[in-house]
Amino acid sequence: MIKVAFFTNDLKNINAHFGSADQFAVYDVEAANYSLSKVVSTEGERTDGRIELLNGVDIVYCTEIGPAAAARIVNSKIFPIKYKDVVSIEDELVKLSQMLSTNPPPFIKKILAARG
């Protein structure tokens, strides 16, 4: 299982900037399914506070992230993924679940190995 956070304004799409989003949704993703774990408010939080709120998350999706914030996330052992276009959270969850059940890319294999 991997934990994935989506920065979102509507809880349906990856459509928010890491530094200015008011919330993110965390999902538990497995080979056969996925489920919403929690929705976390980020209002008033700066970069370090946002990273702290991501504790336990393996991958973060957002539409934009600054280089300093991206470096801090990577140093926290979280893999950031940036989409320029708005993407459906549901579509991304389906892709991740399928990847886990077939042949995950190296970065996901590394996450799974670290989780034990």
Image (cartoon, rainbow, N blue to C red):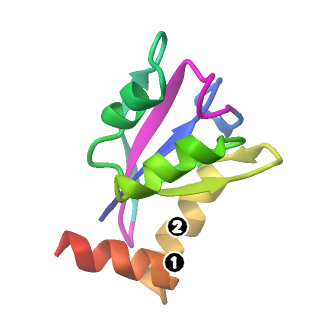
What residue appears at the point 38 percent right and 70 percent down from the top-left corner?
Answer: 32
Query: What type is the residue that disc 2 sits on?
Result: Leu
Circle 2 is placed at which residue position? Answer: 96
Q: Nearer the viewer, residue 56 or 93?
A: 56
* Amino acid type of the residue tagged 1 in the rendering: Met
40 is higher (above) or lower (below) than 7: above
Where on the picture, by quarter, is residue 92? bottom right
Q: Is residue 38 visible?
A: yes
Q: Quadrant of residue 14?
A: top right
Question: As rendered, which of 82 and 89 lies closer to the eye?
Answer: 82
Range covered by the magenta-colored residues: 16-32
Q: Which mark is residue 99?
A: 1
With respect to residue 10, does 82 lie above or below? below
Does the magenta run of residues contain 52?
no
Q: Residue at x 74, y 48 (%)?
A: 87
Where is residue 58 shown, x and y percent of the image? 38, 57
- Between residue 4 and residue 91, name the one nearer to us: 4
Helix, strand or loop at label 2? It is helix
Q: Quadrant of the N terminus?
A: bottom left
